C-alpha cells in the first residue's frame, strides 16, 4: 500500500543524477568548442550588421523603418539588450550567450534521445551535436549570428512536440522563425508528430495559436507592413541565382564538403539508419529534409546556413549508434572529436584579412571625422561603422540592399534597378538630410562599384573630393559649401 506513492521518487532521483553528471560535460565541451569565437572582435559582416543595428535602435531607431534588414527582429533585440547591459564596445556578451545557446541545444537533443533510446543515447546526442556544431569555416560556425540562436528554438519545438505540448511547440517554432525565417522549417516535423499521435482536433488549434501569437506580437511591436515586407515579401530578387550560377554552385559544393568532413563520424551511422529495418522515427528524417530545404531556400548556400542540419544529423546518428556495438559508438565519437579539434585549431590560427581591412578603414574614419558626424561606407562590411563608432548616413548598411549584390553575386543582376523596392529614393533623401562627412567607396572593383551606379556617381562628383586610398578603398571628403563654409572633415 505504501509502495505506490513512493514509486515516482525513483525516476526523479535518477533524472537528477543523470543531468548532474551530463550537464557539466556538455558545458565544458560547449565552452571548448567555442574558444575561437572569443579570439577576434568579430567574425563576419552579419555580426557587424547586428551591432550597428543595435546601436541605432538604442539611439531611437525604429526596426523596419529607420533600421532595416531582411531578418526577423529577435536577434537585433537581443544585441540591443546585451549592449544596454554591458556596453556596445564588445561582442563578448553575445559570445557568452552563443555558448549558452549551443549548450541548450545540446541538452534538448540529449533529452530527446534519452527519452527515446536510453541514457547512453542521451549522452551521445549531446556530445555529437557539440562536436559537429563548429564543423564549418570559423566565420560561419564561431560567429554569434542567426543560426546559432535559432537552433535552440528548433530543438525546443521538437522537444515540446515529443511530449504533446502543442502550444509550447508552436511558440518555439515562432521563436525560431522570428530569429531567422528558415527556422520555421521545423514546423514540418512538429506537424507530423501531431498527425501521427492523432491529436489534430485538440492539438492543431493550440499549435496554431502558439505560433501565431508571437509572430503577430513581433509585427505589432515593430511596423506590421515593414515587418511583412522585410521578412517575407521583399526578398524576391535576393532569392535567385540568376547570373551567378557557377559562383553559387561552387559555394554550395565547398560548404557541403566542409560539413561532410566535419560529420565524418556521424554520416556512416546515418547511412546505416537509412538501410536498417528499424529506422529512426520519420519525424527525424522530416527534420533533416526540412532543414536541407531551408539551406536550399534563397539559393545562396552560405556556410552558416548549414548549421541548421547539425541537430537532426546528431539525432539520426544517435538513433543508429544506440543499437550498434560499443566499439562503433566509440569510433563515431572519437572521429567527431578529431574533426572538431581540427576546426577549433582552424578558428584559432587562420588569418582574417577582411577584419584587418575593416579595422584600417575604421581607424581612418575615426581620425578624419568627429563622433557626431554621419558617414557612408559603400561596401559589404557594416562592421566598419561599429569599429569606428560612427553613425551611418543611411538606413541601408550595405551596398547589397541597394544593388542586390547579396554577398558575392557576380553576374549581371547587380545595380540600381535590382535594389530593394523603393530603396534609392529613400537613399537620396537621406543623403540630403544627413549628408555624410566622409564617404568610403569600399567596392574594390566589385560589381557594385560607385562608378557603375549613376546616382552614387553623381553624388560623389557634385559634393565630394577624393582625399585618400586605403587597401584599394577610396575615401571622399565633403567639399565645403562655399568660400568660408564649414568643413565636415578633419585632416
Image (cartoon, rainbow, N blue to C red):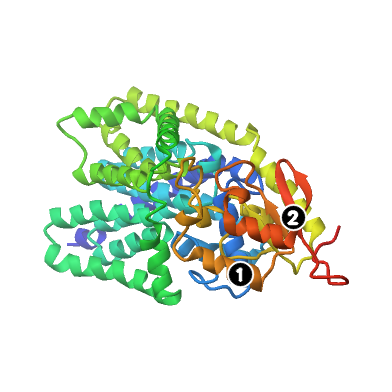
Q: Percent x, y for residue 96? A: 57, 53
Q: Quadrant of the C terminus?
A: bottom right
The answer to whether any part of residue 299 appears in the image is yes
- Residue 476 - label: 2
Q: Percent x, y for residue 376? A: 66, 59
Q: Quadrant of the N terminus?
A: bottom left
Q: Nearer the viewer, residue 325 or 236?
A: 236
Q: Percent x, y for residue 232? A: 36, 61
Q: Quadrant of residue 197?
A: bottom left
Q: Nearer the viewer, residue 151 or 46?
A: 46
- Residue 430 - label: 1
Q: Nearer the viewer, residue 80 or 345?
A: 80
Q: CA distance from mark 1 to mark 2?
A: 17 Å
Residue at 83% of width from left, 67% of height from top? Answer: 487
Q: Quadrant of residue 325?
A: top left
Q: Identify the secondary structure beneath mark 2.
A: strand
The answer to whether any part of residue 91 appears in the image is no
Instruction: Left or right? Give the position of 323 relative to 430.
Output: left
Q: Percent x, y for residue 343? A: 53, 32
Badge 1, how many Cα within 10 Å: few under 14, some, many 20+? some
Amino acid at each position: 500500500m505504501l509502495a505506490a506513492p513512493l514509486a515516482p521518487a525513483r525516476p526523479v532521483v535518477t533524472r537528477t543524477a543523470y543531468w548532474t553528471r551530463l550537464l557539466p560535460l556538455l558545458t565544458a565541451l560547449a565552452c571548448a568548442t567555442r574558444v575561437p569565437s572569443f579570439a577576434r572582435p568579430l567574425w563576419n559582416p552579419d555580426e557587424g550588421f547586428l551591432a550597428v543595428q543595435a546601436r541605432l535602435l538604442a539611439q531611437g531607431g525604429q526596426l523596419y523603418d529607420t533600421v532595416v534588414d531582411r531578418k526577423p527582429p529577435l536577434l537585433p533585440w537581443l544585441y540591443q539588450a546585451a549592449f544596454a547591459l554591458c556596453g556596445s564596445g564588445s561582442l563578448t556578451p553575445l559570445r557568452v550567450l552563443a555558448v549558452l545557446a549551443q549548450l541548450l541545444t545540446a541538452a534538448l537533443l540529449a533529452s530527446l534521445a534519452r527519452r527515446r533510446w536510453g541514457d547512453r543515447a542521451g549522452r551521445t546526442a549531446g556530445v555529437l551535436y557539440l562536436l559537429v556544431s563548429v564543423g564549418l569555416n570559423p566565420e560561419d560556425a564561431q560567429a554569434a549570428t542567426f543560426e546559432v540562436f535559432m537552433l535552440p528554438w528548433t530543438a525546443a519545438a521538437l522537444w515540446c512536440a515529443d511530449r504533446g505540448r502543442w502550444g509550447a511547440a508552436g511558440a518555439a517554432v515562432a521563436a525560431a522563425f522570428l530569429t531567422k525565417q528558415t527556422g520555421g522549417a521545423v514546423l514540418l516535423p512538429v506537424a507530423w508528430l501531431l498527425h501521427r499521435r492523432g491529436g489534430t482536433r485538440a492539438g492543431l488549434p493550440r499549435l496554431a495559436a502558439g505560433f501565431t501569437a508571437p509572430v503577430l506580437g513581433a509585427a505589432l511591436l515593430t511596423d506590421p507592413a515593414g515587418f511583412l515586407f522585410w521578412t517575407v515579401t521583399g526578398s524576391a530578387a535576393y532569392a535567385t541565382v540568376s547570373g551567378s550560377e557557377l559562383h553559387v554552385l561552387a559555394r554550395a559544393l565547398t560548404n557541403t564538403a566542409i560539413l561532410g568532413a566535419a560529420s565524418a563520424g556521424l554520416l556512416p551511422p546515418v547511412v546505416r539508419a537509412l538501410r536498417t529495418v528499424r529506422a529512426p522515427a520519420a519525424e527525424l528524417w522530416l527534420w533533416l529534409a526540412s532543414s536541407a530545404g531551408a539551406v536550399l531556400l534563397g539559393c545562396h548556400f552560405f556556410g552558416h546556413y548549414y548549421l541548421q542540419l547539425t541537430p537532426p544529423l546528431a539525432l539520426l546518428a544517435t538513433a543508429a549508434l544506440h543499437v550498434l556495438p560499443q566499439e562503433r559508438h566509440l569510433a563515431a565519437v572519437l572521429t567527431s572529436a578529431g574533426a572538431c579539434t581540427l576546426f577549433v585549431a582552424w578558428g584559432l590560427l587562420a588569418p582574417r584579412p577582411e577584419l584587418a581591412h575593416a579595422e584600417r578603414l575604421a581607424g581612418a574614419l575615426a581620425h578624419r571625422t568627429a563622433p557626431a558626424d554621419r558617414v557612408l561606407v559603400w561596401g559589404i562590411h557594416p562592421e566598419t561603422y561599429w569599429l569606428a563608432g560612427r553613425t551611418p548616413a543611411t538606413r541601408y548598411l550595405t551596398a547589397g540592399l541597394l544593388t542586390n549584390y547579396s554577398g558575392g553575386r557576380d553576374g549581371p543582376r547587380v545595380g540600381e534597378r535590382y535594389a530593394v523596392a523603393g530603396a534609392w529614393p529613400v537613399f537620396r533623401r537621406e543623403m540630403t538630410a544627413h549628408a555624410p562627412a566622409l564617404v568610403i567607396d569600399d567596392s574594390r572593383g566589385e560589381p557594385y562599384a560607385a562608378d557603375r551606379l549613376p546616382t552614387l556617381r553623381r553624388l560623389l562628383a557634385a559634393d565630394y573630393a577624393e582625399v585618400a586610398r586605403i587597401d584599394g578603398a577610396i575615401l571622399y571628403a565633403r567639399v565645403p559649401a562655399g568660400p568660408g563654409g564649414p568643413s565636415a572633415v578633419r585632416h
